[in-house]
Image (cartoon, rainbow, N blue to C red):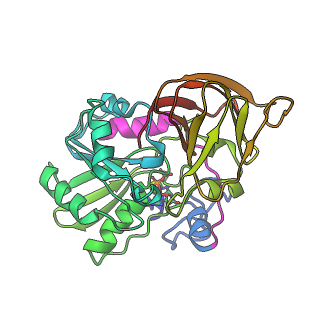
C-alpha cells in the first residue's frame, strides 16, 4: 500500500485507530480528522511532539545544501537566535514575521539593526507579515536570488507562521491549491510537507520546535486564542512608583520593588486584561506563583516567552510572579 500523507499537516494518514495521529474516516480523504476539525470548526486537539523528533527533522535539513528560511515571530524573538546555526549551516534567510502586530510606528530598519548588532549570521534579514501580505513580493525575489536548488525549507519555532507564509506564497504566485493547516495552537504541522510553487521552486513546510518555556504550553485553549494577537498591538504604558505593581489577567504579576518613578509599556495582545496595583504591600494576588527578581538596567525589555514583552525605561528592581515553567528574561529594548 502506498503511504498517503495529510495535506494539512504532513502526518501519515490511517483509518484504523481514532485515538492515534493521522486518523481519517476514509483513506480517500486528503486530510486527517484533526486538521479537518481545526479548519472547519476551529477545534483543537493538542498533539505533543518530542523535540527529539523535531531536531532530527532539522538535522536532515542541515544535511542538504538547500536554502532555508528561518521564520520567527517578531513578538516572540528567541533568546538565542543563532542556536539554529549549529544544526543548520545552510544558506539562511531570517524572516521576521507578524510585523502587523507591532505598532506601525516601529520601523523595520530599527528591527533589522537591532539584530544585526548581535552579529548573527544570516544572508539577509527580511521583515514580513504573512497574514497581511506585507513584503511577500520582496521575500520571493530574495528566495530566487539565494536558492541553491529547487527546494527551499521553511523552519522555525511553533506558531511562527511557517505554514501561513507558504500558503500565502502559493496563493499569490501559483494557481495550485495549498491547504496547509494553520492555528494558534502549538504543533500544528506534524511532518514535512512539500509544495511545488512552480518548476523552479518547491517550498517545504516543517513542524516547529515547541519551547518548553513558552506560555503556550501552560494555558488552556480559550486563553491561547486571547494571547495570540490578530491586530496591531496598542501598547499600554503604566507609570509606576516603588511598591506599585501590574497584574496581567491572573497569571503574571510584576512588582516594582526598587527604583525611581518608572515607565512600563506592555506589548501584549489587546485582549488581555491588565490592572495596576497602587500598593503592593498586603496584596497577595498571584503570589502563589513562582517569583523571579530582576535588576533592570536602562531601557530593557522583560520578555515573557510566548506572550510578548514589557519595555522598562529606567533602572530598578522588579519581582515577577509567573508559572514556574514559563521562561522570562531581560534583553536590551527592541523598540
Ligand atoms: N498577526 C499575525 N498572525 C499570523 C501571521 N502569520 C501567522 N499568524 C498566526 O500565527 C498562528 C500560527 O500560524 P501557523 O502558520 O500555524 O504557524 P506554524 O509556524 O506553521 O506553526 P507549527 O505548524 O505549529 O510549527 C496562526 O494563528 C496564524 O494565523 C502574521 O503575519 N500576522
Ligand atoms: Mg505549521
Residue 142 falls in image quadrant: bottom left
Residue at image point 72% right, 34% down: 244
Residue at image point 60% right, 74% down: 40
Say if residue 2 shows up in the picture.
Answer: no
Left or right of residue 222, residue 77 in this image: left
Left or right of residue 159, residue 18 in this image: right
Q: Is residue 173 depicted above or below 164 in this figure?
A: below
Rendered location of residue 276, percent (x, y): 72, 44
Nearer the observer, 67 or 20: 67
**Image quadrant for the N terminus?**
bottom left
Nearer the observer, 178 or 32: 178
Rendered location of residue 10, percent (x, y): 45, 57
Residue at image point 12% right, 54% down: 145
Q: Is residue 165 depicted above or below 86 in this figure?
A: below
Nearer the observer, 35 or 304: 304
Say if residue 129 shows up in the picture.
Answer: yes
Residue at image point 40% right, 52% down: 192
Rendered location of residue 34, percent (x, y): 60, 62
What residue span does the magenta drawing correspond to? 41-62
Residue 304 falls in image quadrant: top right
- Residue 47 in the magenta stretch? The answer is yes
Left or right of residue 298, residue 166 in this image: left
* Residue projecting furthest to the front: 261
Rendered location of residue 92, percent (x, y): 24, 42
- Residue 58 in the magenta stretch? The answer is yes
Nearer the observer, 300 or 55: 300
Q: Is residue 34 depicted above or below 154 in this figure?
A: below
Amino acid at each position: 500500500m502506498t503511504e498517503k500523507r495529510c495535506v494539512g499537516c504532513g502526518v501519515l494518514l490511517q483509518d484504523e485507530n481514532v485515538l492515534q495521529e493521522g486518523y481519517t474516516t476514509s483513506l480517500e480523504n486528503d486530510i486527517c480528522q484533526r486538521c479537518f476539525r481545526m479548519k472547519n470548526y476551529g477545534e483543537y486537539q493538542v498533539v505533543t511532539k518530542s523535540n527529539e523528533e523535531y531536531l532530527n527533522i532539522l538535522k536532515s535539513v542541515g544535511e542538504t545544501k538547500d536554502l532555508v528560511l528561518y521564520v520567527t515571530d517578531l513578538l516572540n524573538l528567541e533568546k538565542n537566535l543563532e542556536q539554529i546555526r549549529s544544526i543548520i549551516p545552510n544558506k539562511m534567510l531570517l524572516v521576521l514575521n507578524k510585523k502587523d502586530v507591532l505598532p506601525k510606528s516601529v520601523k523595520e530598519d530599527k528591527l533589522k539593526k537591532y539584530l544585526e548588532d548581535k552579529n548573527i549570521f544570516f544572508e539577509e534579514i527580511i521583515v514580513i507579515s504573512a497574514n497581511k501580505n506585507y513584503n511577500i513580493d520582496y521575500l520571493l525575489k530574495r528566495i530566487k536570488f539565494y536558492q541553491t536548488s529547487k527546494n527551499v525549507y521553511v523552519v522555525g519555532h511553533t506558531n511562527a507562521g511557517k505554514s501561513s507564509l507558504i500558503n500565502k506564497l502559493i496563493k499569490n504566485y501559483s494557481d495550485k491549491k495549498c491547504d496547509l493547516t494553520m492555528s494558534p495552537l502549538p504543533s500544528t504541522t506534524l511532518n514535512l510537507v512539500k509544495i511545488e510553487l512552480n518548476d523552479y521552486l518547491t517550498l517545504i513546510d516543517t513542524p516547529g520546535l515547541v519551547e518548553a518555556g513558552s506560555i503556550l504550553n501552560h494555558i488552556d485553549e480559550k486563553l491561547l486564542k486571547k494571547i495570540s494577537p490578530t491586530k496591531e498591538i496598542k501598547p499600554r504604558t503604566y507609570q509606576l512608583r516603588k511598591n506599585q505593581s501590574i497584574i496581567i489577567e491572573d497569571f503574571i504579576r510584576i512588582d516594582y520593588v526598587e527604583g525611581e518613578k518608572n515607565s512600563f509599556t506592555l506589548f501584549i495582545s489587546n485582549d488581555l486584561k491588565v490592572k495596576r496595583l497602587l500598593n503592593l504591600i498586603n496584596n497577595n494576588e498571584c503570589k502563589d506563583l513562582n517569583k523571579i527578581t530582576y535588576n533592570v538596567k536602562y531601557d530593557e525589555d522583560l520578555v515573557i516567552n510566548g506572550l510578548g514583552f514589557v519595555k522598562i525605561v529606567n533602572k530598578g528592581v522588579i519581582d515577577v510572579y509567573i508559572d514556574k515553567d514559563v521562561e522570562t528574561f531581560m534583553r536590551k529594548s527592541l523598540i
